[in-house]
Image (tube, rainbow, N blue to C red):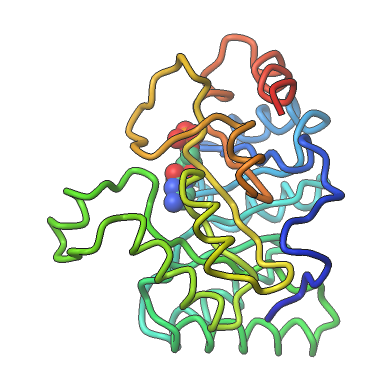
Amino acid sequence: MMTNTSASKAPELSPKERLIVALDVSSAGEALSLFDELKGEVGAFKVGLQLFSAEGPGIVRTLVGRGAKVFLDLKFHDIPNTVAMAAVEAAKTGAWMLNVHASGGSEMMLRTAGEVGEYCDRNALTPPKLIAVTVLTSTDGPTLHEIGVTRDPETQVVELAKLTARSGFDGLVASPREVKQIRTAVTNEGFLIVTPGIRSVSATKDDQKRVTTFAEAITNGADYVVVGRPITMAADRVGAVKELLAQA
Ligand code: C5P
C-alpha cells in the first residue's frame, strides 16, 4: 500500500514535523505529562512495548483524542493471519503509523497491508502508514551472527528493505547509518524511512549501536527520526528538542 506518492523523501516537512518522541515510560500519567510538555515542539509521539504493556490501547486512543499523531511501535512478528488481524485492531486506535518486523517475510507484510487497507477503505478511515523494522539499531554484526544471520548488518538491512518495498508497505525503520544505501536500493516513490538511534555527538549511546546525530539522519535522507532518552531523560526537555532541531 503505497499511500504517499509525492517524492522519495517528503521535502515539505520541517525538522519539527520529522521529529517523533518515544514515550518509553511505564504509565499513562508520565506519558501524558511528556505529551503536554512537548506537544507544540515535535511532530509525533511513539507508543512502544513498555507503555503499551502497561496501559494498553487506551493510551493510544487518549493521545489521538488529544490531537497527537501516534506511531504505534509494537513490532509485530507472528504468522501472517495473526499479524494482519492485530494490525487491523491497531489501526482502529487511530494510530498514524504502525510497524512489523520485515524478517516476518513478504506473506506476512502483504497480508497485513491488504487487511488494513480493506478495513480502512470499508470504514472511510485514513490508513496508517505501515512500516517494517529491518534490523534493530541495537543489533550489530556479532548479534546477527548469534542468531544465525551471516550477512553483515548493512547487507541484511538492504535485503529486508527491498523485501519490504515489494510487500505493499509504506516504508521501514532502519539505522540512520543505512539510509543512503536504502535510498539507492529502493527507488519506490514516497517510500518512508524512519530512523531511531539518534544521539548528540558527545552523548552516551545507551544500548544503541548504530547511531548518528539528528542532522546527519535528515541529511542522509530519513523522513522521520525517533528520539527517546536524549529528550525524555534531559533535565530540560524542551531545550533538548530545540537543540536537536537547531542542528538540522
Ligand atoms: O531512547 P532511544 O532514543 O534509544 O529510543 C529509541 C526508540 O526507538 C526506542 O523506543 C526503541 O524501541 C525504538 N526503536 C529502535 N530501533 C528500531 C526500532 C525502534 O531503537 N529499529
Q: Nearer the viewer, residue 131 or 46?
A: 131
Picture residue at 60% right of the left edge, 75% below the top: 169
Q: Is residue 30 visible?
A: yes
State the image coordinates of residue 192 (x, y, percent, origin top left): 65, 61
State the image coordinates of residue 109 (x, y, percent, origin top left): 50, 81
Name the residue at the front extreme. Answer: 184
Quadrant of the frame with the N terminus? bottom right
State the image coordinates of residue 190 (x, y, percent, origin top left): 73, 67
State the image coordinates of residue 39 (x, y, percent, origin top left): 78, 33
Picture residue at 61% right of the left edge, 32% below the top: 214
**In screen coordinates, is 18 left or right of 132?**
right
Picture residue at 58% right of the left edge, 24% below the top: 231
Picture residue at 42% right of the left edge, 86% below the top: 80
Rendered position, 20 above or below 98: above
Q: How many marks?
A: 0
Q: Is residue 53 visible?
A: no
Rendered position, 63 above or below 113: above
Rendered position, 164 above or below 10: below
* Residue 128 image-quadrant placement: bottom right
Quadrant of the frame with the C terminus? top right
Q: Nearer the viewer, residue 105 or 184?
A: 184
**In screen coordinates, is 229 left or right of 93?**
left
Name the residue at the top extreme. Answer: 235
**In screen coordinates, is 98 left or right of 79?**
right
Rendered position, 143 above or below 26: below
